[in-house]
Image: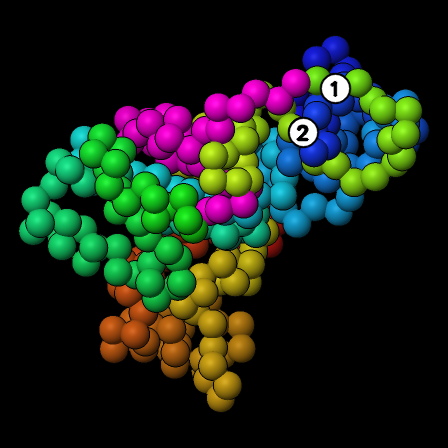
Amino acid sequence: MNKIQGFYYVKSEENVYECKLRGILKRKEKKENCVVGDIVEISEDNSIIEVYPRKNMINRPLVSNIDYLVIQFAGKDPEVDLDRLNTLLLNSIYYKINPIVIINKIDLLTEEEIANLKERLKFLDSVDIPLFFVSTYKNIGVEEVKNFIKDKTVAFGGPSGVGKSSILNMLQNEENLTVGETSKKLKAGKHTTRDSKLIPSNCGGYVIDTPGFSSIDLPPIKDFTELISLFKEFDFQEGEYCKFLDCHHISEPGCLIKEKVEKGKIFKERYNFYKKVYEKLKNERWNNYERY
């Protein structure tokens, strides 16, 4: 939300109300008390009296209740960095936001290059992550994206130079909401907070640019069990198990995950990324708390 000198701007239908926090929300004095995307209840005197439970929240930037995180890369200039893509996917899943991958600038690619890129990104289908190939320059594939995110709150992340601003401009609703007077008949109800970064979309819902979510930092994963849970392809079917119940899927004998990698049932690139993250977290974070 847009917060200026202690004021919050809350959207209700076609109006935006200037509000302040009330009661315990104000006394907490924490930045996460009320954030962009929150569903709140306001009173007749324009006070935020309750923030409803969030389905998700990210801290940089501080936004909540996102339906989809669009992870955008370019097919060329710059080319897709799979490690960075996988890191963004890991963050999205950690923060309980459904990811979507968009590859822009396909007008710069030959058919053979597009086919090769689709092969490199084939792993996305195995973990049920939607993939769109678009060209904002030639308006190719944009309508498919609009149909998919219709009436949803969508955040955008990805490296610079991939055309995020172009697609955000194509999705932006040109209608400007104005700050409205509170009707004397208005009674407390549910409303949605907004700020200058939460932009009404011309296909319904909202879009928000999240530059802080484009970093390559790993999320605060607390242990190897939590890390494993973020890889959907590691889920066991009924009757499947590794030899050891606490298998880390690294060097243990009788590991079903390693067996699936060898048989091509799990993409080797994804498994290698898992091992890379595991070793990094083990050496830089986990060893500070317990030994593995």
Helix, strand or loop for disc 2: loop
Percent coordinates x, y for residue 218 in the rendering: 47, 42
Which span is picked out in magenta? 149-178
Q: How far apart are the alpha carbons under marks 2 and 1?
A: 9 Å
Q: Residue at x 53, y 72 (%)?
A: 246
- Residue on which disc 1 sits: 180
Quick one: label 1, few (<14), some, or many (20+) residues within 10 Å? Answer: few
The vertical placement of 182 against 40, above or below, is above
Q: Which amino acid type is marked by label 2?
A: Glu
Residue 16 visible in the displayed image: yes
Q: Residue at x 47, y 81 (%)?
A: 237
Q: Nearer the viewer, residue 255 or 144?
A: 144
Q: How is the structure coloured here?
A: rainbow
Residue 167 part of the magenta-drawn span: yes
Q: Which amino acid type is marked by label 1?
A: Gly
Q: Residue at x 49, y 62 (%)?
A: 228
- Residue on which disc 2 sits: 14
Q: Nearer the viewer, residue 246 or 234?
A: 234
Whichever of labels 2 and 1 marks the residue nearer the N terminus, that label is 2
